[in-house]
Amino acid sequence: MPMPNILIKIPQGAFDARQRAKVLQEVTQVALTVEQIGDDPRQRALCWVLLEELAPGFWSCGGADSSAQAVPCMVRVKVPAGVLDAAQRQAYVEGLHQALAACLAEDDPRMLMTSILLDDVADGTWGANGSLWRLADFARAAGYRHLSHLHAR
């Protein structure tokens, strides 16, 4: 029951290997912090981050290739409904943008452009390992500190 699922799309070559590794690490940390996932390594292992590079010619901004001026990043976060409140949503968007900005080289003149979607997955519609999970199942597995009232159920 991996959750959250964070899918990041970037243009191929926008980040080198070291920067891509940093993206995965920084984005994971934002998710763990914002969603208040427990400290147990088994709980943290539920946070999946996938980074996909799109080949040249598969990304345009306004109908043009803007790779010389900008680094566009599309991020989609799938999280069980009921995990995030309004403040956490804002913290997620800010944190993800800042995490990606921190991964650019200091001397990179390109502007970072992020598009971040926070998708709530309706309760009882997330399947993992052949079973449907509900919010209480996720709360127990992830150890969400702010949803500790659901852990005991």
Image: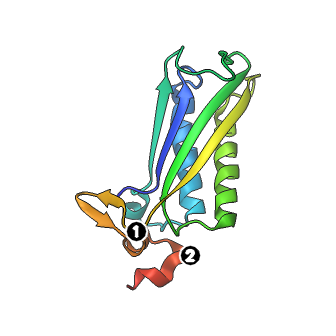
**Residue 61, quarter of picture:** top right
Horizontally, residue 100 falls left or right of residue 140, namely right
Between discs 1 and 2, the one toward the N terminus: 1
Residue 74: numbered disc? none
Residue located at (49% from left, 71% from top): 144
The crowd level at tag 1 (other Cα within 10 Å; few <14, some 14-19, many 20+) is many
Residue at (56, 38) in percent of width and height: 22
**Residue 19: percent from the left, percent from the top?**
57, 31
- Residue 99 point in image, percent of width and height: 65, 44
Q: Compared to 52, does 146 lie above or below?
A: below
Report x, y in % for residue 60: 62, 21
Q: Is 123 left or right of 14, judged from the image as shown? A: left
Residue beneath label 1, please?
A: 138
Query: What whole-number distance in Å separates the C-alpha atoms at marks 1 and 2?
Result: 12 Å
Quadrant (top left/top right/bottom left/bottom right) for the C terminus: bottom left
Residue 146 numbered tag: 2
Task: Tell me where residue 40 sits by quadrant.
Answer: bottom left
Q: Amino acid at mark 2?
A: His
